[in-house]
Amino acid sequence: MGLIKGIKKLADHKDIQVSEEQYQQIDIWKALYKGYYEKWHKVQYQTINGQKTRTMKTLNMPKVVAQELATLVFNEKCEISISDEQLSENIKQVFKTNSFYKKFQDYLEYNFALGGMVIKAYAENDQIKLSYVTADCFIPLGWDNKGINEGVFVNEFRKGNKKYTHLEWHLWEGDQYVIKNEVYESNNSTDLGVKVSLKDFFPNLKEEATIENLKRPLFVYFKPNTANNIDITSPLGISVFANALDTLHSLDIAFDSYQREFRLGKKRILVPATAIKTVVDPQTGQMNRYFDANDEVYEAFNFDQDSDGIKDISVALRVEEHISAINSLLNILAMQIGFSAGSFTFDGKGVKTATEVVSENSKTFRTKQGHETIIEAGLQELVEVIVQVAELYGIFAGPEDYEVTVTFDDSIAEDQTAEINKQIQLVSNGLTSKKKAIMKIHGLTEEEAERLLKEIREEQQTATAEAIDFFGMSKNRNSEGE
């Protein structure tokens, strides 16, 4: 990132305790996720015509892994239920206005790739807006056992040949929550530079805003359910593939070799060294070569005088060997990121995923559930932040006590019909209550399940009364009474 050292020098703010190394790793994870990490993918090689540079081919597994995991954990079928009906409607409206389900899945993918993300809530034109921030643009300043409670958001932009950095500080000063905004100007990409006027770039922002009576910060930090072994004292998360970099590099080497096998394996021809030399056309004076010096197919060789000269030494393509090597590396990668062996396979055309059906006792499903635990806690905090901002600006009020339940889509790992039959059997044998079964099947809160159970009982009573009338039982009883 290159800015932490500069930000640390700002004496009027809190000390930054995270290391530069963490953000250097984030830069690497981000480059790999985007599909080009210069240290790996810029390849230099020697030809007859001198040194050349090319870009190594890549399977881009960091993107595949992050996308697959984000899809497994969160999608449109995920339900966020709130016990209070009015609050539930208000939160649904906020999510709809902010296209939450689509944006959250995108940023959840960035979260798994870069090791974290942040969602901020703020008010604009009597509406709650959500702002999403990737891990490379957030620096924690303070934290405790509950999580990160102070931080600075970094936003870089350019105008002309100068770089500008907007720093948005979220700090606690006693019981007061303080938001400070600053802009710095620099002539290069490494230094923070000098402080300039905020109004020149953000006329609607205040340099400092103090908010009282807040219970928690106005942002929520999400991270993967993976322990940080880069800096064990840091509250930041790490990428899901942070400990699989060697495997990812080997995969790209193998895939690059696989693609070049077709290009270089077509022909390999030995030609006399004299055929490679440059000669002058006596009529035009132009320099000519017998063969293209940039073509890797031809190799110059000093033949004996009795030799035939040009020789074709083409070899058989090693297709199956490459496919087998890539698949073995994919199994190692799956193990390192918490997926079951065989989750990713290479068939010579591309990588296929085998997570369409996942058993409940599989490693993939356990990893999915582990990430869901962290995501659920974060979403519950997000609802708290939204309610806090809404009350602060008088948009809507929340009840003193409410319950937030997140029901993830487990259909990828469960047969819904089998789950329903399982709950019916448990109720029939007296091993669970009808309310618990309804909560499990429909993903409802306890209060919602009670309301549904009440509706079911009322319908059953109505149906019983109608059946009695249909068979004339009430009439018969009246006749007997007469």
Image (spheres, helix red, strand yellow):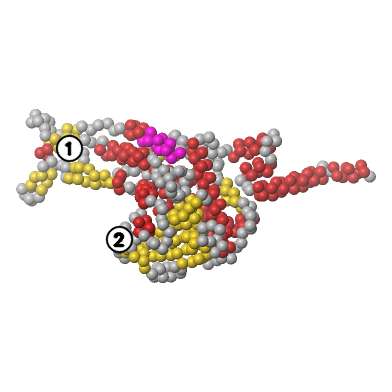
To which quarter of the image does residue 434 belong?
A: top right
> From the viewer's perspective, is 476 left or right of 296?
right
Residue depicted at x 45% and y 49%: 235
Amino acid type at image mark 1: Glu
Question: Mark 1 to mark 2: distance in Å?
Answer: 46 Å
Tell me the chief SS of the magenta region. Answer: helix
Instruction: Specify few, some or many for label 1: CA neighbours under 10 Å numbering under 14, 14-19, or 20 or more.
Output: some
The picture places residue 124, in percent across and down from the top left corner, at: 51, 65
Name of the residue lying farthest toward the top? 306
* First-in-chain label (1 vs 2): 2
Image location (x, y in percent) of residue 148: 48, 53
Q: Amino acid at mark 2?
A: Asn
* Image position of 181 (left or right of 415): left
- Figure check: 206 above or below 257: below
Give the position of the N terminus as an image quadrant.
bottom left
Q: Nearer the viewer, mark 1 or mark 2?
A: 2
**Element type at mark 1:** strand
Magenta segment boundaries in residue numbering: 326-338
The residue indicated by pointer 1 is 299
Q: Nearer the viewer, residue 283 or 406?
A: 406
Residue 94 image point, x, y percent: 55, 59
Residue 323 falls within the magenta-colored stretch: no
Task: Tell me which residue sits at (35%, 56%) in the image.
Answer: 5
Q: Which residue is mark 2?
A: 188
